[in-house]
Image (tube, rainbow, N blue to C red):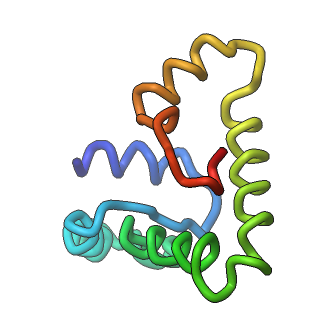
Amino acid sequence: MQELAENIVSSLSSDRIVIICKDVEEKIIVSLLNQTGWKSKIQTIVTENDLLNWYEKALRGKYSKELGENVLQNLIDEISIEFPATDITEFSKFLKQRKYDNLDDILWK
């Protein structure tokens, strides 16, 4: 894991990095950042649970009318940038691998 972190940090020029990780990885990442002195480059760490809570509020909660459409549009835009439509076959494989093709919530349709 340290080698992966070194490769990532050495390839970045920004000092406002946001790390997104699984909840169980957060303490390990913080410990590694402290040991290596890289903590100053990290703006914040967001866990998977944080994201789920934010999306729940934005898509179904109190703020869904104000935020829901914007969140979904931003996701669509970012996915389009990350996975250009030039190879729809690869993108379809990605959707199936992540089980995004099985979402049954009306907001995702």
Quick check: 77 above or below 64? above
* Relative image position of residue 12 (x, y in whole percent): 57, 52
Residue 108 visible from this viewpoint: yes
In the drawing, does residue 21 fall left or right of residue 62? left
In the drawing, does residue 59 fall left or right of residue 100? right
* Relative image position of residue 8 (x, y in whole percent): 45, 47
Instruction: Out of 42 and 72, give the one closest to the viewer.
Output: 72
Residue at 76%, 37% (x, y): give it.
Answer: 81
Quick check: 108 above or below 19? above
Residue at 60%, 69% (x, y): give it.
Answer: 15
Instruction: Out of 24 and 75, give the one closest to the viewer.
Output: 75
Give residue 66's quadrant in the image. bottom right
Residue at 42%, 35% (x, y): give it.
Answer: 98
Instruction: Out of 16 and 103, give the one closest to the viewer.
Output: 103
* Relative image position of residue 10 (x, y in whole percent): 48, 49
In the drawing, does residue 73 fall left or right of residue 35? right
Residue 32 visible from this viewpoint: no
